[in-house]
Amino acid sequence: MQRKSFVTGLFVILAGLFLTLWSAKPAQAAEKHYTIGTDVTYAPFEFANEKNQYVGIDIDLMNAIAKTEGFTVTIKPVGFNAAVQALEAGQIDGVIAGMSITPERQEKFLMSKPYYNVGVVMAVKQGSKIKSLKQLKGQRVAIKTGTAAANYALSVKDKYGFTTVTFDDSNNMYQDVTTGNSVACFEDSPVMQYAINTGLKLSIVTKPANPTGYGFATNKKNTELMAQFNAGLKKLKANGQYTKILQKYLGTGSKKSQAAANKKTQETDRSFFGLLKANWGTLMGGLQETLLVTVVAIIFATIVGILVGLLGVLPNAFARGISITFIYIFRGLPLLVLALFIYTGVPSLIGAKVPAFLAGIITLTLNEGAYTAAFVKGGIEAVDVGQMEAARSLGLPFGKALRKVILPQGIRIMVPSFINQFIITLKDTSILSIIGILELTQTGKIIIARNMEGFKIWTMVALIYLVIITLLTWLSKWVQKKVQA
């Protein structure tokens, strides 16, 4: 017995000594982690390669600086405009997306030292007779919103007498020129050259103008991250890594070496089925995200819609007022505006981040919930008023009469609308790409930014949507027959 007590006591002493020594060890500081927003449709600075991995000058540079300075990063592909708005709202810590350093941006953000200098060029359709800015008088020119190239075009349009049309991504801007809707577009020189080397049927006809530098941006308070970026950039330039990153995507400067660098990131088979095979996994990943957002949103939208719809038929003016107001506001707001308000506006008000997925679910829940509430309310009101009067005359209270008599008849009217709303929600998820949700449409944009095969990739995306919607339509008809049987 004494021996057991001795062993137990010795164990306690050793354990205590171990814990004391462990706690006395100097604690290692955890690595800082930052979320960096970018636009992965801006090759060669940020894009997805043939393996659909995010690469590019900006991506490699950011990762190299993080490694050099001892912090970690998560690259978040949200698109240029959404990234800038997310940075303003505090949703992300920084933006690296071919972002030109301008006085306006320096007023809002901390901007790094330039890590790449560019100029703006004008490109036209191959074979076009337009060779200079003077020939643009009375013509339409395509630009990309929020870019330095767009600002340059707007600054000279009155001088040269042309009009502009704005697009949210480069591919649509390029396609507007290749199809002849616009006669020219303006783009940063390395980006334009990369697209042409990839097979885009455009030609650069002007020398680089309005020289500017690309910079990394953080909010005004994040001086530590900005200092680390500038320090890391200086070290990479000194040890040669910076030059290696540039040559990886731009070659040694000649058009031939640039074209060779481009080919390393492209699919070898550019036929429809070759592209489909190469990008099948990525497209299915986008579809999976689309279906996940749709299912989760429709569940919450149905719950909200039923509750709000029932409020609209209660014999209470206040309850009906809440229902009418909810339906009026959230059915009237454009989905795009609502998504941006929740993702970038609300965080500014509450001082906390709202994850993109959660923002997307809330957006669809409010919007689709309003439509659901409208047809729930309408379905109940479509039941003959005599049904309620008859139920009440038999002594049933309002709640029981609604539940036992009215709702069973109203549901028969509502069921087709529920299935149709599911289809509408599925299609509405495409708008959520604006806040960085990588659903099917955004996946298509990312693939196109690499290979410029817009027609083929959008055909694939359209066919996938068509198959899913066809299956849901068949389900709607089957359910409708069962309910009405």
Image (cartoon, helix red, strand yellow):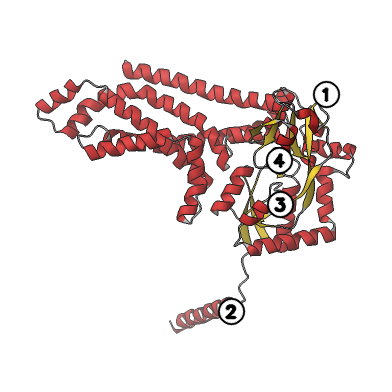
Would you name the residue on which mark 4 appears? 155
For disc 1, the marked residue is: 129
Q: Secondary structure at mark 1?
A: loop
Instruction: Determine whether, in the image, residue 312 is placed left or right of residue 136.
Output: left
Distance between the alpha carbons at the discs numbered 3 and 4: 17 Å
Labelled pair 4, 1 in contact (Cβ < 8 Å)? no
284 up-or-down from 484: above or below: below
Give whichever of discs 3 and 4 has the lower sequence position.
3
Q: Position of residue 183 (x, y in %)?
A: 74, 26
Q: In the current view of this chain or complex, which residue is farthest to the front?
A: 159
What is the three-letter code of the residue carrying label 1?
Lys
State the CA–CA distance, disc 4 to disc 1. Answer: 23 Å
Tag 2 or tag 1, which sits nearer the N-term?
A: 2
| Whether residue 80 is situated above or below residue 241 in the rendered picture | above
Q: Is residue 24 visible?
A: yes
Amino acid carrying label 4: it is Ser
Foreground tag (3 vs 1): 1
Q: Please state which amino acid type lies under the numbered disc 2.
A: Ala
Q: Nearer the viewer, mark 4 or mark 2?
A: 4
CA gap between label 1 and label 2 equals 77 Å
Which disc number belongs to residue 24?
A: 2
Instruction: Identify the mark at residue 452; answer none if there is no mark.
Output: none
Q: Residues within 10 Å of mark 1 (few under 14, many from 20)?
A: few
In the image, taking residue 246 as reference, residue 328 lies left or right, namely: left
